[in-house]
Amino acid sequence: MIDLYTSPTPNGHKASITLEELELPYQVYPINLGADEQKTPEFLAINPNGRIPAIVDREAGDFPIFESGAIMIYLAEKAGRLLPTDPKGRSRVIQWLMFQMGGVGPMMGQANVFFRYFPEKLPSAISRYQNETRRLLEVVDRHLTDREWLADDFSIADIANWAWIRTHKWSGVSIEGLPALERWKTAMYARPASLRGLDVPARMPDLSEKEEEAERFSRQAGKLLQR
């Protein structure tokens, strides 16, 4: 059994989608970021960095794992799926996982902060992060022009990038003119396990829903994407 400590953020959804796709049994422990539950001594014993998600593998002597990418690799190796074992295939998946960890996630995260939450509207900061996010999405679109998935087959790389890219409207970034990315995003939404993972512990609006619902989420969870 896996214990999953998470919140409704793209990084949190990376872990829950992976668990659903791998069909691994898990127990959810929602973490209230607004109440700083990720800073409690109990949680810091699992993740010294005080961030979600984190997991504890009860079948491996209560082994704790933090950092979303590390969690995904660990779970894929545990299940023997979504991460190839041959060196080249494994490298292709990890390259695109690191692309999300080092590029898509940080840039979209900062776009979210300055576009949605920062008390002052700073046009230079907003445009800097939105423009870099758009550039990264164009990289993904070009790569997907002649292939179905980011690596040789569906993998944790697709999960990691989709968990963030699906929220592009939340960052104020358009994907107009990126047909390969649109096709890939639609294919991800067609996966029942991935959709189930988005509902753990709750789904974050992607603004394809009603704008007023997104604004309500923004007011209620204003701290989520700043942490």
Image (cartoon, rainbow, N blue to C red):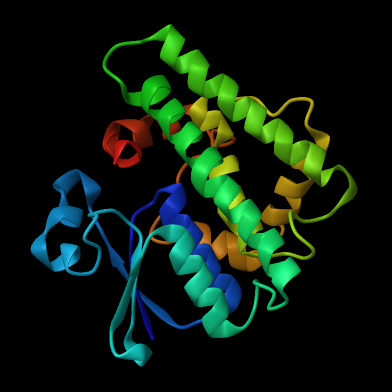
Residue closest to the eye, 225 or 144: 144
In this view, 79 is above or below 174: below
In this view, 162 is above or below 139: below
Q: Quadrant of residue 157 in the image? A: bottom right
Q: Position of residue 172 (x, y in %)?
A: 53, 23
Q: Residue at (54%, 33%) from the top-left corner?
A: 207
Q: Position of residue 139 (x, y in %)?
A: 72, 36
Q: Quadrant of the C terminus?
A: top left
Q: Residue furthest front?
A: 87
Relative side of 168 to 112, left or right: right
In this view, 140 is above or below 218: below
Residue closest to the eye, 151 or 52: 151
Q: Residue furthest left?
A: 41
Relative side of 139 to 30, left or right: right
Q: Position of residue 226 (x, y in %)?
A: 31, 36
Q: Residue at (49%, 42%) from the top-left corner?
A: 105
Q: Residue furthest right?
A: 146
Q: Position of residue 214 (x, y in %)?
A: 44, 33
Q: Is residue 23 visible?
A: no
Q: Quadrant of the N terminus?
A: bottom left
In this view, 58 is above or below 161: below
Q: How many marks can you see?
A: 0
Q: Residue at (68%, 68%) from the top-left corner?
A: 90
Q: Residue at (67%, 63%) from the top-left corner?
A: 91
Relative side of 139 to 179, left or right: left
Q: Is residue 188 visible?
A: yes
